[in-house]
Image: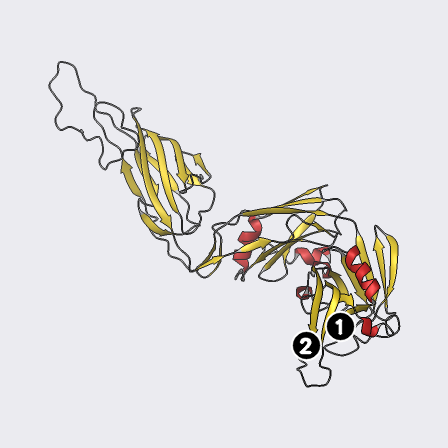
């Protein structure tokens, strides 16, 4: 694991004064020393105040402190009153006081300076305030992530999706991420987190969402490590709303698509899907509309068919609904109208007439479910939003905590 635990040994901070309380914000080494030399002569007795002796970790002015290193403050003598650890914006780090010691309960942010302010009382009740500071490490890579579809109205098949810009490289690191993310739904629905791959953490309900559900996501991930010398620096939260239940079924063998909204058939559309072949056959499985892309240029070079070779094509298409990252769309195909409802002639997409494609585009939203049956080529979960390719028990097994 990258990073060096620097400066996390204890440093004793002692505030001393003569004949009264220490001034707020002062600290000094030593115990019970007179501030002004020998006591003056007096007929009355002089009492020496003894402030609390403190042990603070990380040490004052420490640098390169790991974000997962706890801040600890302990009273060697006397007792703690308050402990406050703040960043440059004044935001406090959460912590708890127990058995005479304070320990942070939240992770720190990388590349951040922190100030520790401690109020305490000596054994004789002498109050004092002590401050120290430290700086967390600056990682080589700051990991970033996003909560997808924030603020949108989505279909019943859209999972909560937290996507990282790069891999969360170990199962242990993915488990730490998973422990800190939460989903709240109204109405309440059971569900589970799982990883599609090492970049995509998703939460899906047992079955499709109930229409009208509101979903809120919290991802307080700052201070987590996701790889060698790679740390997250931000927290995030978001949510979305679930719209109507629209589920379409594409029968590849029958060349027909049946569209249902809230369980009722609202349209049956003749289609032409992928012609038989290793690269062109449409995948069977339960897919989700990933994006509404409108106009898209289809290029056979993405299938390994270069210009000048048999089967090459480059075509501008309309009314595109993406259902896989590997290039499958539902779209307008005026050139294949004669085959729609009769034969499969596409390179893997669902071809429709311009009018039907425009209707489907207008009626759909991201997250709507499109089921494909009748092909020997399976849809792999990582080829799109593949959470519904798992049984619920199978999906729970994708958790890093399982």
Closest to the observer, 339 or 38: 339
Closest to the observer, 391 or 22: 22
**Residue 112 located left or right of residue 380:** left
Give coordinates of residue 265: x percent, y percent. Answer: 88, 55
Quadrant hosting residue 395? bottom right
- N-terminal of the pair, mark 1 or mark 2, is 2
Q: Residues within 10 Å of mark 1 (few under 14, many from 20)?
A: many
- Whether residue 192 appears in this view of the structure is yes
Residue extending furthest top? 43
Give coordinates of residue 381: x percent, y percent. Answer: 68, 64
**Residue 185 located left or right of residue 61:** right
Alpha carbon distance from label 1 to label 2: 10 Å
Element carrying mark 1: loop
Residue 348: numbered disc? 1
Closest to the observer, 295 or 16: 295
Q: Residues within 10 Å of mark 2 (few under 14, many from 20)?
A: few
Mark 1 and mark 2 residues within 8 Å of each other at the beta carbon: yes
Element carrying mark 2: helix
Closest to the observer, 235 or 382: 235
Residue at x-position 31% and y-position 46%: 61
Give coordinates of residue 63: x percent, y percent. Answer: 34, 51
- Does 308 sit above or below residue 190? below
Residue that mark 2 sits on: 303
Residue at x-position 29% and y-position 24%: 124
Residue extending furthest left? 41
**Residue 82 located left or right of residue 106:** left
Quadrant hosting residue 84? top left
Quadrant placement of the N terminus: bottom left
Residue at x-position 61% and y-position 47%: 238
Give coordinates of residue 221: x percent, y percent. Answer: 52, 50
Quadrant placement of the C terminus: bottom right
């Amino acid at each position: 694991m990258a990073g060096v635990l620097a400066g996390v040994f204890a440093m004793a901070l002692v505030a001393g004064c003569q004949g009264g309380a220490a001034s707020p914000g002062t600290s000094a080494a030593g115990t019970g020393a007179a501030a002004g030399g020998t006591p003056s002569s007096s007929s009355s007795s002089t009492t020496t105040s003894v402030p609390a002796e403190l042990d603070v970790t990380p040490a004052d002015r420490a640098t390169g402190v790991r974000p997962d290193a706890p801040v600890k403050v302990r009273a060697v003598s006397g007792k703690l009153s308050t402990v406050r650890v703040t960043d440059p914006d004044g935001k406090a780090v959460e912590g708890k006081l127990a058995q005479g010691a304070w320990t942070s309960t939240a992770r720190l942010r990388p590349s951040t300076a922190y100030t520790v302010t401690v109020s305490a009382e000596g054994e004789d009740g002498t109050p004092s305030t002590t401050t120290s500071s430290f700086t967390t490490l600056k990682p080589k890579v700051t990991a970033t992530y996003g909560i997808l579809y924030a603020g949108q109205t989505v279909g019943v098949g859209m999972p909560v999706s937290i996507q990282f810009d790069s891999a969360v490289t170990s199962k242990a690191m993915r488990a730490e991420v998973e422990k800190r993310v939460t989903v709240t739904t109204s109405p309440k629905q059971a569900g589970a987190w799982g990883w599609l791959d090492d970049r995509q953490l998703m939460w899906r309900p047992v079955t499709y969402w109930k229409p009208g559900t509101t979903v809120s996501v919290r991802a307080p991930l700052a201070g987590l490590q996701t790889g060698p010398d790679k740390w997250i620096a931000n927290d995030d939260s978001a949510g979305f709303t679930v719209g109507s239940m629209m589920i379409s079924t594409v029968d590849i063998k029958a060349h027909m698509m049946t569209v249902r909204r809230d369980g009722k058939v609202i349209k049956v559309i003749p289609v032409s899907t992928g012609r038989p072949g290793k690269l062109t056959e449409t995948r069977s499985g339960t897919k989700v509309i990933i994006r509404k892309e409108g106009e898209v240029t289809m290029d056979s070079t993405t299938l390994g068919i270069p210009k000048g070779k048999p089967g090459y094509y480059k075509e501008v298409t309309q009314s595109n609904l993406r259902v896989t990252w590997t290039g499958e769309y539902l779209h307008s195909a005026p050139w294949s109208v004669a085959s729609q409802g009769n034969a499969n002639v596409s390179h893997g997409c669902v071809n429709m007439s311009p009018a039907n494609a425009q209707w489907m585009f207008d009626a759909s939203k991201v997250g709507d479910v499109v089921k494909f049956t009748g092909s020997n080529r399976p849809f792999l979960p990582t080829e799109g939003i593949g959470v519904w390719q798992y049984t619920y028990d199978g999906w729970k097994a994708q958790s890093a905590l399982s």
